[in-house]
Image: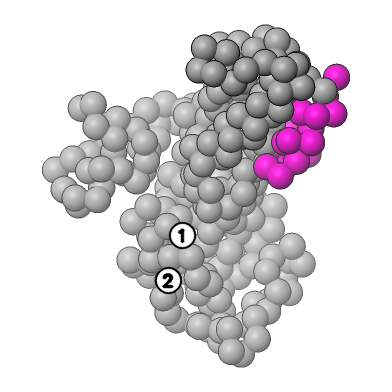
Amino acid sequence: MITLEQLQAGLVLPIDKPRQWTSFQAVNKIKAILRQYTKELSSSHSLPLTPSHAPKIKIGHAGTLDPLATGLLLVCIGRATKDIPRLQDGDKVYTGTIVLGATTPCFDLERPVDHYYPYEHITAELLNETVKLFTGTILQVPPMFSAVKIAGQRAYKYARTDDPTVTIQPKPVNVYSFEITAFRPGSDNGQLSTHSPSLPPTPSPSQQNTHLYQHPLGEVPTHLPQAEFRIHCGKGTYIRSLARDLGLAIGSGAFLSALRREQVGDYTVSNALQLDEVASYLQNLA
């Protein structure tokens, strides 16, 4: 069982953030677990839980994940919060799925499709050649639906007002590798091909909706092509923007339908905790 002194000395918890949780909600969940844990520790040592005796433990995370993204979120506790800038500077590895032939205003599933584009010309060979344009040090424009600041205001606040006069300036980012790991061509009949077993299975007729996209969190139109990817990148890279730019480069549109952060620096998601495992992890930590 980890002691209060050890918690205050510093601990980094690698968390596997669930889909539709914000990073803030995940940190708040761990805050609640820590409050209960420190309460139990104080009780076991017969310490009164008055405000003057309540242990204060700092907590924060090293890099936001979008609500629809899953994967590695580093939660820093105690003096480990001083390491947040260093951890944020670490390289990242992401995997996910890009839908081709359509766009959304926020470049992912948070908003419905706003435009459809030709996709019949898209092949695995075209994608493999085009992603080479997005490796190395590149200039990238972050999404308007993001926490980037414009004149001291978060970009997403401007995005909600739909003000066309507000723009984000491009910034350099480092993309060390961008691989297409699977590709499923588009179709006219709404059926998913068996080109790649790692992509979603064919939906039943009742689930198929070939040409409409009715809800931001609903099914992706089944007739559109999809590509799975793996990206190794540096600090500040927006994968949603890479998806948008890839769509433009191949003469179509694109948006993210899935994103998972696999690695941050030396930390990997394979060693991460589920949120409901944190309490028992602290109990068993020496």
Label 1: few (<14), some or many (≥20) within 10 Å? Answer: many
Q: Is residue 265 magenta?
A: yes
Query: Tag 1's secondary structure?
Result: loop
- The kind of residue on which mark 2 rests is His
Judge left or right: residue 157 versus residue 35: left
The picture places residue 251, in percent across and down from the top left corner, at 41, 59
| Distance (Cα) linking label 2 and label 1 | 9 Å
Residue 74 numbered mark, or none = none
Judge left or right: residue 248 versus residue 96: left
Residue 215 numbered mark, or none = 2
Residue in view at x 40 percent, y 31 percent = 139
Residue in view at x 62 percent, y 43 percent = 17
Query: Is 127 situated above or below 37?
Result: below
Query: Is 159 situated above or below 150?
Result: below
Quarter of the image for the N terminus: give it.
top right
The picture places residue 91, in percent across and down from the top left corner, at 61, 26
Judge left or right: residue 63 versus residue 163: right
Q: Which residue is mark 1?
A: 109
Residue in view at x 62 percent, y 17 percent = 48
Query: Is 272 situated above or below 182?
Result: above
Most foreground residue, 280 or 151: 280
Q: Which residues are magenta?
A: 263-286
Q: Is residue 57 visible?
A: no
Where residue 7 sits, quadrant-wise, is top right
Where residue 113 sits, quadrant-wise, is bottom left
